[in-house]
Image (tube, helix red, strand yellow):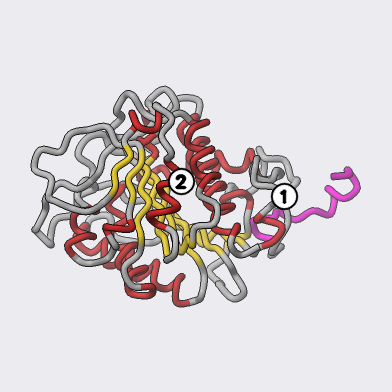
């Protein structure tokens, strides 16, 4: 951008610009996601990125409440570039906004799931696709409730070190390790159309289910991951949830429950690109815990994941 143009530039995050890549200095201005417009007005919007800064359902290290802020800041590094390997820029074609963070009372934990469901439903009712920035993985369950209310049972494509299928029949519990079990019990997801990618822990009390599991060893062995996912989940609405701990701790140390033997950043990017064509209706990226991060590499990885999810959503809408 010419210096003369820069003299008249207004901070893109508050200027009201609706489309186009941003060429402002990435180290300046309001750190909205990809320097998109910050707004609560969903009129004409295609995709709304929104933060759910809740981490009181973790079993180990907290800190994911700071995830949305960290991912936004990391994303500003990419605001002037199209996502690599997709062949198009979703920011040029679609109105993508930063819807801000959901407000809630941190001391009223039992009320949070209902607030998340209503928050996501507001976005969906406006005809907008939501992408959530967590927060811990418990935020996915109320998001799935809102999506199932609109679309019926959806296919779940889950990138995760943990299957999150631990048995839990207590409706009052809020736990980041049981959301898949509860989603199956509540009929929110179509288990036979759902796939888990990158898992690598044992679950002793796991309930029986029909979800296909392509574990980390399968990915590392060069298994046909994307072909299987497209065959299993294709043909209907898909919700994608990406727990950053699917990445090996070498690539994502800033998370609450790191597990060795995980995916690389390169593998994850290739897998997301290979899912082009799925009917994505919503997504979340969760479990980024900045207090355990180093040089913001976990937040940066998450920001790239969100950008690729945005490109994945836009593939069918180009």
Q: Which residue is mark 2?
A: 227
Viewer-nearest of discs 2 and 1: 2
Report whether 22 appears left or right of 105: right
When asked about the image quadrant of residue 13, the answer is bottom right
The image's mark for residue 22 is 1
Q: Residue 314 versus residue 8: which sits nearer the camera?
A: 314
| Residue nearest the viewer, comparing 215 with 141 | 215
Q: Residue at x 65, y 55 (%)?
A: 90
On screen, residue 280 above or below 78: below
- Residue at position x 70%, y 47% from top? 87
Q: Secondary structure at mark 2?
A: helix
* Crowding at mark 2 (Cα within 10 Å: few <14, some 14-19, many 20+): few
- On the picture, is 4 further left or further right than 53? right
Residue 220, horizontal then vertical, whole percent:
40, 27
In terms of sequence position, does the residue under pointer 2 or pointer 1 come before the other?
1
Q: Which mark is residue 154?
A: none
User: Is 62 included in the stretch rendered in magenta?
Assistant: no
Instruction: Judge from the rendering whether residue 300 lies leftward or rightward of residue 195; answer left or right.
Output: right
Is residue 292 depicted above or below 21 in this figure? above
Which part of the image, by quadrant, shows the N terminus? top right
Q: Relative to 127, say whether 290 is above or below.
A: above
Q: Give, as a single range, the part of the protein colored magenta.
A: 1-15
Instruction: Give the x, y percent position of residue 168.
Output: 11, 53
Q: Quadrant of the C terminus?
A: bottom right
Q: Is residue 5 magenta?
A: yes
Find out whether the residues at labels 2 and 1 contact each other: C-beta distance under 8 Å: no
């Amino acid at each position: 951008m010419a210096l003369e143009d820069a003299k008249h530039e207004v901070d893109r995050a508050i200027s009201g610009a609706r489309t186009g890549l941003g060429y402002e200095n990435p180290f300046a201005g309001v750190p909205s996601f990809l320097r998109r417009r910050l707004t609560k007005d969903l009129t004409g919007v295609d995709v709304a990125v929104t933060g759910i800064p809740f981490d009181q359902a973790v079993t180990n290290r907290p800190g994911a409440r700071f995830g949305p802020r960290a991912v936004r800041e990391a994303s500003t590094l990419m605001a002037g570039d199209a996502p690599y390997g997709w062949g198009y820029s979703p920011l040029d074609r679609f109105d993508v906004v930063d819807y801000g963070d959901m407000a809630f009372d941190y001391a009223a934990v039992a009320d949070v799931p209902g607030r998340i469901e209503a928050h996501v439903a507001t976005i969906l009712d406006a005809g907008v696709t939501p992408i959530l920035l967590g927060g811990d993985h418990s935020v996915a369950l109320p998001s799935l409730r809102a999506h199932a209310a609109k679309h019926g049972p959806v296919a779940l494509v889950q990138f995760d070190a943990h299957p999150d299928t631990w048995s839990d029949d207590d409706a009052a519990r809020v736990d980041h390790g049981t959301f898949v079990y509860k989603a199956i019990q509540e009929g929110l997801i179509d288990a036979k159309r759902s796939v888990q990618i990158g898992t690598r822990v044992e679950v002793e009390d796991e309930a029986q289910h029909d979800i296909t599991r392509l574990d980390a060893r399968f990915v590392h062995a060069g298994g046909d991951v994307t072909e299987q996912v497209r065959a299993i989940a294709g043909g209907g609405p898909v919700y994608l949830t990406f727990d950053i701990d699917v990445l090996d701790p070498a690539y994502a140390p800033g998370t609450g429950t790191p597990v060795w033997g995980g995916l690389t950043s390169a593998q994850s990017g290739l897998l997301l690109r290979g899912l082009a064509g799925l009917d994505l209706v919503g997504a979340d990226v969760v479990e980024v815990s900045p207090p355990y991060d180093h040089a913001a590499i976990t937040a940066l990885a998450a920001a790239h994941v969100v950008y690729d999810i945005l490109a994945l959503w836009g593939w069918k809408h180009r």
